[in-house]
Amino acid sequence: MGPLPPGKKFLGAGIYAIYYTGRFKPYRRVAEQNRNNKFEQPIYVGKAVPPGARKGGFGLSTAPGPALFKRLNEHKSSIAAAENLKVGDFFCRYLVSDDIWIPLGESLLNESFQPLWNILIEGFGIHTPGKGRKKQVRSKWDTLHPGRGLASDLPPNPRTSAELEQMIADFFAGRVVPTISPEEAVTEEEE
């Protein structure tokens, strides 16, 4: 366990978990599980794969370079841009892995921990929308945590911050929470 991002650059691809310990009120339940060095509930899990792996292959013939380190730094930048989060409240664990195991590892972490930013407040891990995707609405993450430049030109999300905070409260209370509304979905024609 260490700060986000790790202090020293390293090579490799793999999987990671990000933990929150701060005072943002809607995330109180997550933060309480992670304070005092407990780190029991990631707020987000993800993967970093070698260049080219997202285009169908696993990147087995490609050296990963600092793929995982770079991805963790991208996340730090997203958090730093948010107006209501502090980078110092986030920690990470990561595992450099052979490329073939990365998708499986990420899936298992998601299934085991059901991280809030993966299953309910989506959009933390996105990159700048590409061609044809400017019609998509601002992500739930960017609605709840304004400040990232990549979301500034996108149409507003139909859900307000207050509605998203209520969804989070319902989620922690064990109530059924819709994860996507028709207005948030991007149709194939818009892509």
Image (tube, rainbow, N blue to C red):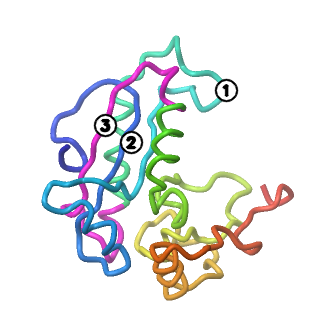
Give the x, y percent position of residue 88. Answer: 18, 61
User: Residue 83 magenta-drawn?
Assistant: yes
Q: Amino acid at mark 2?
A: Arg
Where residue 56 is drawn, which disc sits there?
1
Quadrant of the rendering where the N terminus is positioned: top left
Badge 1 marks a residue whose secondary structure is: loop
Q: Amino acid at mark 1?
A: Gly
Residue range highlighted in magenta: 79-103
In this rendering, the label closer to the viewer, 1 or 3: 3
Residue contact at pointers 3 and 2, CB within 8 angstroms: no
Q: Nearer the viewer, mark 3 or mark 2?
A: 3
Locate residue 33 relative to residue 54 in the image: left or right.
left
Q: Residue at x 47, y 82 (%)?
A: 165
Residue 35 sits in quarter? bottom left
Judged left or right of residue 8, residue 187 is right
**Left or right placement of residue 99 versus residue 9 in this view:** right
Between 163 and 108, the one lying in front of the other is: 108
Residue at the spot x=30%, y=77% of the render? 24
Q: In this figure, what is the number of numbered marks?
A: 3
Q: Could you give the CA–CA distance between mark 1 and mark 3, rounded to whole angstroms?
A: 24 Å
In the displayed structure, would residue 149 be above or below residue 130? below
Label number found at residue 4: none
Are dots 1 and 3 in contact, CB under 8 Å? no
Residue designated by label 2: 71
Most distant residue in the bottom direction? 162
Which residue is tagged 3?
A: 94
